[in-house]
């Protein structure tokens, strides 16, 4: 077995829920900083010409409407660009009422954002499982898993992007329950024994063969994906998340707040649209990433591998069999 080292530093995860107000961000009260780093035999996945993944199916799975945007949107957009047919699965309904909103308002607004994320990333359809926000650990994981197995078989999913079921110190139950249900479902979907009634309905066993798992805390990182060519789509997917998370329209709000004080930041640009894009690009994904997302800057992750922008994953693919080579080298005629 290859050696795998975990090197973890101080851990305290940001609370990614509800829109961060600019006042919260400026005061630092929105989050607690966390750092984590892992390294091992890293593979760098670069942009590929053409559509090498044509005919393959991707499921991008998130508990809440802002998870993929923050942590994996560059990779999802890259895989779609390279030929995947993609679907977005959201496990919760993001109902988290507060600050004068009703639960109905919140569910509706987050649903709009979730669909906008799918559109920004080129995902063709959204499946909402609709479990209650922050309560996923109160449901039967068999129910969640069964629904995912059905979808993996129905859509013939080859590749998934999701939270890492083996990530450490994740505090949000929606994140780790989703990850655990997904990992078990992708394994069981390929077998012919579980949920045999699916086969009576015309479905067939279908194995998910590639996994891109991301985490907010320590995880095994063995794949760095170059997202330089899909960074703009990642920014798009973050800007449409106005209902929760650190991105949305906070750039414009910061610009307006500074103007009230007679100040401006040149980096934000001249218009609200520019301010939103530049805020996501330069602060959420880069300079203030540790504070706002709880993970290192995409730019810094890339810099270590001579890339402009990058995302990091625990990737698991198809094991390569050594048997064909052994046979070709050792088999003799009788
Ligand atoms: Zn989340």
Image: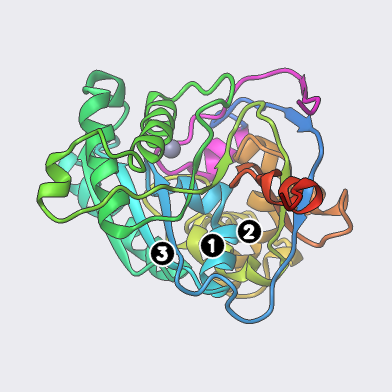
Q: Are marks 2 and 1 in contact (CB under 8 Å)?
A: yes
**Residue 140 appears at what percent x and percent y?**
22, 22
Residue depth check, mark 1 versus mark 3: number of the one nearer the observer:
3
Please provide the residue range marked out in magenta.
1-27
Colour pattern: rainbow
Which residue carries the number 1 mark?
252
**Residue 270 appears at what percent x and percent y?**
64, 75
The quarter of the rendering in which ligand 1 is drawn is: top left
User: Is residue 210 placed above or below 87 in the rendered structure?
Assistant: above
Comparing 272 with 213, the one in front is: 213
Which of pointers 3 and 2 lies earlier in the amino acid sequence? 3
What secondary structure is the stretch in magenta mostly built from? loop
Residue 86, which numbered label? 3
Disc 2 under 8 Å from ligand 1? The reply is no
User: Is residue 326 placed above or below 177 in the rendered structure?
Assistant: below
Q: Is residue 82 left or right of residue 58?
A: right
The residue drawn where x is 56% and y is 51% is 72
Q: Secondary structure at mark 2?
A: helix
Q: Are marks 3 and 2 in contact (CB under 8 Å)?
A: no
């Amino acid at each position: 077995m290859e050696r795998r080292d975990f090197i973890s530093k101080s851990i305290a995860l940001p609370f990614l829920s509800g829109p961060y107000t600019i006042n919260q961000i400026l005061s630092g009260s929105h989050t607690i900083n966390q750092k984590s780093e892992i390294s091992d035999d890293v593979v760098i996945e670069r942009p590929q010409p053409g559509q090498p993944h044509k005919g393959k199916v991707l499921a991008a799975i998130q508990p809440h409407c802002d998870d993929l945007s923050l942590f994996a949107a560059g990779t999802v957009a890259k895989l779609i660009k390279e030929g995947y047919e993609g679907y977005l699965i959201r496990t919760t309904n993001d109902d988290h009422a507060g600050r004068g909103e009703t639960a109905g308002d919140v569910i509706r607004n987050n649903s709009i954002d979730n669909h906008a994320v799918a559109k920004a990333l080129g995902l063709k359809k959204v499946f909402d499982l609709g479990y209650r926000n922050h309560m996923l650990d109160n449901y039967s994981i068999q129910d969640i898993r069964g629904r995912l197995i059905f979808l993996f078989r129905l859509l013939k999913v080859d590749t998934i992007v999701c939270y890492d079921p083996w990530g450490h110190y994740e505090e949000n139950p929606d994140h780790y329950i989703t990850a655990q249900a997904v990992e078990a479902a992708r394994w069981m979907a390929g077998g012919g024994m579980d949920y045999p009634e699916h086969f009576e309905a015309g479905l067939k066993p279908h194995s998910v063969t590639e996994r891109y798992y991301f985490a907010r805390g320590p995880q095994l990182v063995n794949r760095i994906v170059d997202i330089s060519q899909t960074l703009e789509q990642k920014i798009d997917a973050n800007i449409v998340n106005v209902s929760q998370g650190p991105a949305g329209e906070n750039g414009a709000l910061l610009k307006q707040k500074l103007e009230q004080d007679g100040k401006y930041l040149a980096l934000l640009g001249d218009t609200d649209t520019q301010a939103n894009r530049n805020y996501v690009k330069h602060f959420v994904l880069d300079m203030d990433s540790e504070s706002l997302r709880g993970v290192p800057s995409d730019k810094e992750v890339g810099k270590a591998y001579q890339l402009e922008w990058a995302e990091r994953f625990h990737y698991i693919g198809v094991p390569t069999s050594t048997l064909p080579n052994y046979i070709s080298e050792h088999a003799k005629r009788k």
